[in-house]
Amino acid sequence: MSKSTNLEREQKILETATDLFIYYGYDKTTVGDIVREAGISKGAFYLHFKNKDDLIENLLVRELKGYAFNWLDRIEADPMGGTIGGMYKNMLYALQDNPLMSALLRQDKRILGSYLRQANNAFKRPQKQPSSRFKFVTMMQEAGAIRQDIDANVIAYIMNMLNFGLVAMEGTMPQEEIPSTEAVIEGIAIIMDKALTPEDGNYSEAGKNVLKQLVAEIKQQHGVE
């Protein structure tokens, strides 16, 4: 059976599934729940997705794309968005805008449930190319926008740690000891700029040019104009 080209209905299914997965979790949400909330038939669902696993894999791609383009729009609007601190700050704000993306990042067992235990889930598949963050850091170093005396893989790993920490800290400390999310994000941006920006200038435009190259590659890969 060929896949339906009804993109409006497909997006409705994905949006409905997102809300249900966040609220009830992957395991407690059935295809029946999704089609009932979306106001469609099961037959219409299967014109778009083979099963619930196929749905969540398409949802992962959709959320990653949405998160990436939100981040890039924020950077373009920020005069200092091309510095490493500005990029990181806007990345974290984009992450905060997307609850499902936050769950994906920390591989939340309540939301993602049994999908995480599958042998061939998206998180366990080997990467054929360097990670996007490693590539980003390498390009920033080549442009002179990040200091070059720290290994790019180490920088990318630390950035991933900070991302994970931001979404995973809730519940590990007394609420009264946790600063506001905005204050934490702004503080991280200052620390990143102080630690990683070369001392001899402001590299915001160089950084934005790196992002433009990455955006062009992403759009080409996904056929986006």
Image (spheres, rainbow, N blue to C red):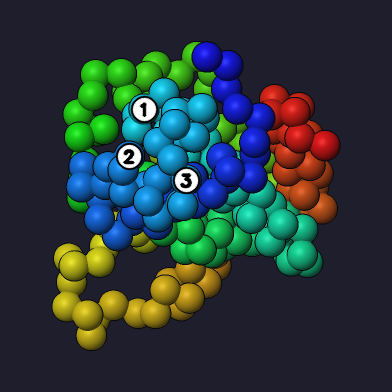
Which residue position holds label 3? Answer: 40
| Element marked by disc 3 | loop
Q: Nearer the viewer, residue 195 or 32?
A: 32
- 157 to 24, vertically: above or below: above
Quick one: label 3 or label 1, which is nearer the N terminus?
3
Quick one: label 1 or label 2, which is nearer the N terminus?
2
- 149 to 172, vertically: above or below: above
Which residue position holds label 1? Answer: 51
Tell me whether the residue at label 3 lies in contact with that at label 1, contact meaning CB atoms closer than 8 angstroms: no
> Could you tell me the amino acid type at mark 1?
Asn
> Could you tell me the amino acid type at mark 2?
Val
**Residue positioned most to the bottom:** 176
Q: Nearer the viewer, residue 116 or 95?
A: 116
Q: Which mark is residue 31?
A: 2
- Image x and y of residue 53, in percent: 34, 29
Q: Quadrant of residue 144?
A: top right
